[in-house]
């Protein structure tokens, strides 16, 4: 979603001016970021603006200049804009994940706006080292009252991991008659088993289990969600289809009754036809 948003902005930006600059910058969470927008000393009656465009948000004005020699400093939370000789500076103190966006420097002169510079800033959190989240499929039929255990396997590589935060595992259930999945269980930190691969000691597999005695209302698709280091990864889902034996037996009984009645009616019709044939003879 954000990538498409970035590409569209890049296309639109390329149509605005013949002298614009567009670049990308990747930084880690907590890193300080400084963006500069050059200003010509001949722009005496020209205002400059720093604007941020983030996915699914309205454009946000972060700061502006009034004139060439104005020493105005504007600060919003951890973002500061100020004018220095020959440049209009935007500074982010300790960048956050939510700072990922496109930052534009815009020139306004005589009610005409020109895009001078654009920067796509991507703020990345620590690498959790997770390579996959998988769930086991249930092969046997499940009936009301049966104990069911769902398993979620988290594969990780310690060599790539730069985050030491523990995994938090949550279980969600999606039902056909519900518009949004519902949270049904939060996994404790001690309720899992981990083992390392003999072939690759850096590879680790942790299995999280969720058990309960099910009822007919528990039908749905169950997803495990692994949250760590500012990221959330979802498993592929396990479909739980609960067969109600009582309803099944009732249906079978009614079918048997219907079949028996049909056989009796057929036998009666055959007897009636034979009696009529005897009378006609």
Image: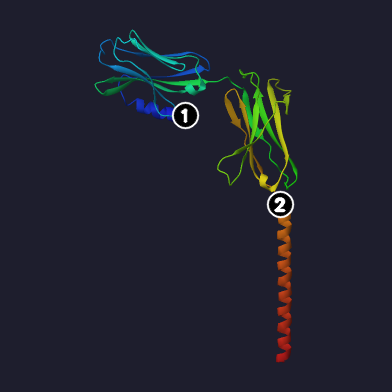
Q: Which residue is mark 1?
A: 2
Q: Residue at x 74, y 89 (%)?
A: 278
- The residue furthest left is 110
Comparing 137 with 150, the one in front is 150
Q: Position of residue 227 (x, y in %)?
A: 61, 27
Question: Residue 183 or 12: which is nearer the viewer?
Answer: 183
- Most extreme residue toward the bottom, as rendered? 281
Q: In which quadrant of the rendered image does the C terminus lie?
A: bottom right
User: Which of the 4 image quarters holds residue 157?
Assistant: top right
Residue at the disc numbered 2: 244
Mark 2: give few (<14), some (14-19) or many (20+) Cα within 10 Å.
some
Of residues 78 and 117, the one nearer the viewer is 78
Mark 1 burial class by Cα count in 10 Å: few <14, some 14-19, many 20+:
few
> For residue 62, what is the image quadrant?
top left
Q: Note whether residue 109 is visible.
A: yes
Could you tell me which secondary element the residue under label 1 belongs to? Answer: helix
In this view, the mark in front (1 or 2):
2
Q: Position of residue 192 (x, y in %)?
A: 72, 28
Query: Residue at the location (48% across, 18% down)?
Result: 26
Numbered label tally: 2
């Amino acid at each position: 979603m954000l990538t498409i948003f970035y590409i569209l902005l890049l296309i639109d930006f390329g149509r605005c001016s013949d002298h614009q600059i567009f670049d990308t910058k990747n930084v880690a969470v907590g890193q300080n970021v400084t963006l500069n927008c050059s200003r010509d000393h001949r722009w005496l009656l020209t205002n400059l603006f720093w604007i941020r465009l983030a996915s699914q948000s309205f454009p946000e004005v972060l700061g502006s200049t009034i004139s060439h020699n104005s020493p105005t400093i504007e600060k919003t939370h951890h973002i500061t804009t100020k004018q220095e000789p020959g440049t209009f500076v935007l500074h982010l103190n300790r960048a956050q994940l939510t700072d990922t966006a496109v930052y534009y420097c815009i020139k306004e002169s005589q009610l005409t706006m020109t895009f001078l510079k654009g920067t796509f800033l991507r703020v990345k959190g620590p690498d959790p080292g997770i390579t996959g989240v998988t769930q086991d499929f249930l092969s046997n039929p499940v009936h009301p009252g049966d104990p069911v255990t769902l398993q979620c396997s988290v594969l990780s590589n310690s060599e790539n991991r730069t985050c030491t935060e523990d995994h938090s595992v949550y279980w969600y259930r999606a039902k056909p008659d519900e518009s949004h999945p519902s949270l049904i269980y939060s996994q404790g930190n001690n309720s899992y088993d981990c083992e390392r691969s003999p072939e690759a000691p850096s590879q680790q597999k942790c299995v999280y289990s969720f058990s309960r005695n099910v009822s007919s209302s528990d039908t749905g698709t169950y997803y495990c969600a692994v949250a760590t280091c500012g990221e959330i990864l979802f498993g592929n889902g396990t479909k739980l289809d609960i067969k109600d034996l009582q309803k099944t037996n009732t249906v079978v009984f009614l079918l048997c009754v219907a079949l028996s009645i049909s056989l009796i009616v057929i036998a009666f019709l055959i007897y009636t036809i034979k009696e009529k044939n005897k009378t006609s003879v």
